[in-house]
Image (cartoon, rainbow, N blue to C red):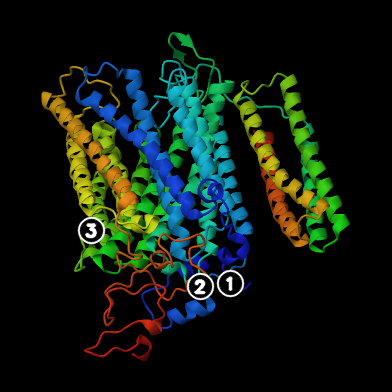
Amino acid sequence: MRFLKAILNKPWDHQGEAASAIAGDMMSVSTSPQQLALNLFLAVASVLFALFGVAYLMRMEVDTSSPFFCGAGYWEVLQEPDLLWLNTGILVLTSGVIEFTKRESRANRSLATKIGLSVGALLTLAFLYGQSAAWGILHENGHLVDSTAASSFFYLLTGLHALHLIGGLWVWLSATMSAFLDRDEPNKVSETVRLCAIYWHYLLLLWVGLFALFLNT
Amino acid sequence: MAYVPIADRPDEMHDPQSFITKYIWSQDHKVIAIQYGGTAIAIGVVALVLSVLMRLQLGFPDTFAFIDPTDYYQYVTMHGMIMVVYLLTALFLGGFGNYLIPLQIGARDMVFPFLNMLSYWFYLLSVIILAASFFVAGGPTGAGWTLYPPQAITEGTPGAEGGILLMLLSLAVFVVAFTMGGLNYVTTVLQARTHGMTLMRMPLSVWGIFVATILGLFAFPALFVSAVMMAFDHLLGTSFFMPAMISLGESVEHAGGSPILFQHLFWFFGHPEVYIVALPAFGLVSDVLSTHARRNIFGYRMMVWAIVAIGGLSFIVWAHHMYVSGMNPYFGFFFAFTTLIIAVPTAIKVYNWVLTLWKGNIRMTVPMLFAMGFIFTFIHGGLTGLFLGNVTVDLPLSDTYFVVAHFHMVMGVSPVLVLFAAIYHWFPKISGRMFDEKLGKIHFWGTFLGTYAIYLPMHYIGALGVPRRYFALGTTDFIPESAFELNAAITVAALIVAAIQVVFFINVFKSLWKGEKADPNPWEATSLEWHTPHTPPHHGNWGPNLPVVYRWAYEYATPGVKDDFVPQSVPPGDVVMKKKGDVFKESEH
């Protein structure tokens, strides 16, 4: 709305406009640039995964009645390993721990922050390990990346989700290092943890969406 | 929170300490802009040479033994992809975006200078990967710039082994580079504007770059998705896009993939891409026209709204590139409708450019010539777009040279003319030197008339039904002898236009070496970048204090004001008013 209001301004009309622009300035910054950039990045990531989702649904609808259809390549439902439920639980727990860490770091409680940072990193690693174990189970059951379209999408989407998490983990670990080495101001660590929390919650939601898609198709 | 000019914080200054941090691993937006620009122009020259080779083959078939069909398709593909992505997108957004955003909004730098630097180095990496494909076995991909599967990764297509993989990898890296740059541009525009620089006081250049960047952030993921999925099909044997088929007498290993799915994904990126290139061009040309016509831009608000509207609409027209793909005909109806709607804000912009010139005090400088040339080529290219936007007209024309002529006029020649206008316009600020006016005019007339000599006849050849994408036309009943003669004439024109570009490079190097020292504001322009304490601007741009903005960027020939321009940073009290022999201040008026 603020944007819409802004673009209704008549910049050539100097009556009253000039003075108010200097005094109030429309661009009172209410979010940090890091927060804004993160929001934008999450929007970009959402578009990316939404497009994969659309591709997934469109690929499911191969026209088996077409005269060109040769009996192969139609959608075969993939039996996802039950381990994914455990992984989902771990990721929910991770989000919880990260939320806890955010509150502790904001309250400047150093020890609790350090514990939260460490446990958060370990749980994230546990989730990634769990996902790779799920890959292993599929592999053992003969569902390779090129076996069916469903298995191809499974490997691709879980892999991309994991890559996003690894990117976040890199930032998380740098914040952990800073906290343990007292390298940065506590409020800088706290700000990083706050942004990481948003990112982890987002990746949890994304995973839940992906998991629901896998289970229902 | 109170307003804090982000880019004015001392810890954001990153003062360069050595040659390496100043010129190579630089975090200064101006140096990064020049790095982006230099790299884009260098790879653009490669694309220009490829187009010359293509034209040699088309104009004089059976003459050049060193061009075989494989080479030809590789030239076509690499020319298209380089021009659209690696030259135009990179130069408009990486080059002019980087240079102009902080300077025109009154910031010291981008909000995330390190990320900005990283963006350039990823871009360079993507260019190197792309160029490497010329040197792998089988050469670069020859699948056409749209890289349609199954052909792109099927044996028999040029570069179907290594070339296509390097292309896909390069595109993926480019998308990463663009995302880093794009997050920076948007955040900087929204958060680092100086005091008084409201959104509606921003020059249209910034508006164009800003909206194009948002388009890029949301459109490039589609390219990323299609590149990753095609790489999977090729490397890991998946069947996202690859159907079951028989190739060279043998069944391929794939089954069930959907080539149309790729086309949807590709054009969901591909059509906004047209506007990712066009919107910055619209913005830059508006500033050049207004400055050199000494007139405020006509309908500034409408220009901003049109940029935003075109940006939004550009996401719902993609399938007009796919009328011949066999998709549902009702889709075609919908997309024809949206395509014609997008012509409305675009036409508003054209009218406004022309009306800006109306009764202006036009100065026929080199940048102005290029900007006015753009109006011509854009109108011509745009009008043929109205033909092709209609399904029934598009079907017979789609695979002919009419399409080639259309898109070259509208998104080849037009943005390139704006690029030249912008380079000549901002060259004095970037380099601190003036360019040679005479050489600039030779460059303009050669390029402008030459491109008409190339593309006007090409429309006619297309209307005759001459198909595009053919290595040689051979003997057919429906192609008259005159079409061959026209093709030869087009090639001669193309060679002349290519040769004229040498004049541009001579001009740039000569001017850099011993050009006349530039006045800080040679065009008497109003926007902030012309009022920096140093020319070229030093690191940090503004000296000790950020400028304060009091008005929009188009205060030219204001009634009652003595000078014919009032810079954005001049306080109202210092504006000298016109009255017979009597000078008094605006505030007293």
* Mark 3–mark 2 distance (CA, rounded to whole Å): 33 Å
List the residue tagged with mark 1.
B3
Badges 3 and 1, same chain: yes
Q: In which quadrant is the C terminus of chain B drawn? A: bottom left
Q: Quadrant of residue A142?
A: top right
List the residue tagged with mark 3.
B365
Is residue B468 visible in this depiction of the protein?
Answer: no
Secondary structure beneath disc 3?
A: loop
Q: Residues within 10 Å of mark 2 (few under 14, many from 20)?
A: many
Secondary structure beneath disc 1?
A: loop
User: Disc 2 residue type?
Assistant: His
Q: In the depicted view, which residue is nearer to us: B470 or B104?
A: B104
Which residue sits at x=58%, y=50%? B115
Image mark for residue B195: 2
Left or right: residue B442 compared with residue A175: left
* Mark 3–mark 1 distance (CA, rounded to whole Å): 40 Å
Is residue B3 visible in this depiction of the protein?
Answer: yes
- Tell me whether circle 1 and circle 2 mark residues in contact (CB < 8 Å): yes
